């Protein structure tokens, strides 16, 4: 078998998977911050109206 081809491809695949997982977590964290950003403002506005 051509280990000179298989090993670098496996390493590249593992690095790609790790990169995608890290990027997904980062995007998910930004999305949660974006969702949670509106909630305190709405609650503060409701408290002022009462």
Image (tube, rainbow, N blue to C red):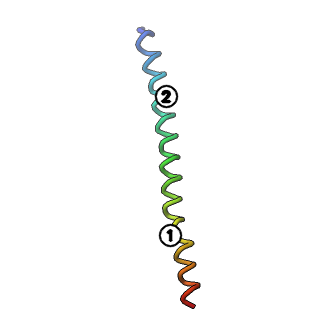
Classify 39 as above or below 3: below
Classify 37 as above or below 14: below
**Image location (x, y in percent) of residue 8:** 45, 17
Q: Nearer the viewer, residue 20 or 37?
A: 37
Determine the secondary structure under disc 1.
helix
**Image location (x, y in percent) of residue 26:** 51, 47
Q: Quadrant of the N terminus?
A: top left
For residue 19, which numbered disc appears in the image?
none
Read off the residue under disc 2: 15
Task: Determine which quarter of the picture holds residue 49.
Answer: bottom right
- The residue sitting at 50% across, 52% down in the picture is 28
Q: Quadrant of the C terminus?
A: bottom right
Q: Are marks 2 and 1 in contact (CB under 8 Å)?
A: no
- The residue sitting at 52% across, 77% down in the picture is 42
Task: Determine which quarter of the picture holds residue 9.
Answer: top left
**Total number of numbered discs in the rendering:** 2
- The residue sitting at 45% across, 10% down in the picture is 3
State how far apart marks 2 and 1 are (Cα).
Answer: 36 Å
Determine the secondary structure under disc 2.
helix
Q: Few, some or many C-alpha atoms within 10 Å of disc 2 (few <14, some 14-19, many ≥20)? A: few
Q: Nearer the viewer, residue 29 or 13?
A: 29
Q: Tell us which disc is closer to us: 2 or 1.
A: 1
Residue closest to the far bottom: 50
Q: Few, some or many C-alpha atoms within 10 Å of disc 1 (few <14, some 14-19, many ≥20)? A: few
- The residue sitting at 54% across, 71% down in the picture is 39
Classify 16 as above or below 46: above
Q: Nearer the viewer, residue 15 or 40?
A: 40
For residue 38, which numbered disc appears in the image?
1
- Ranked by sequence position, the earlier of labels 2 and 1 is 2
Answer left or right for 3 relative to 46. left
């Amino acid at each position: 078998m051509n280990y000179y081809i298989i090993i670098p491809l496996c390493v590249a695949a593992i690095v790609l998977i790790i990169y995608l997982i890290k990027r997904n977590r980062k995007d998910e964290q930004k999305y949660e911050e974006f969702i949670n950003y509106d909630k305190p403002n709405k609650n503060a506005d409701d408290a002022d109206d009462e």
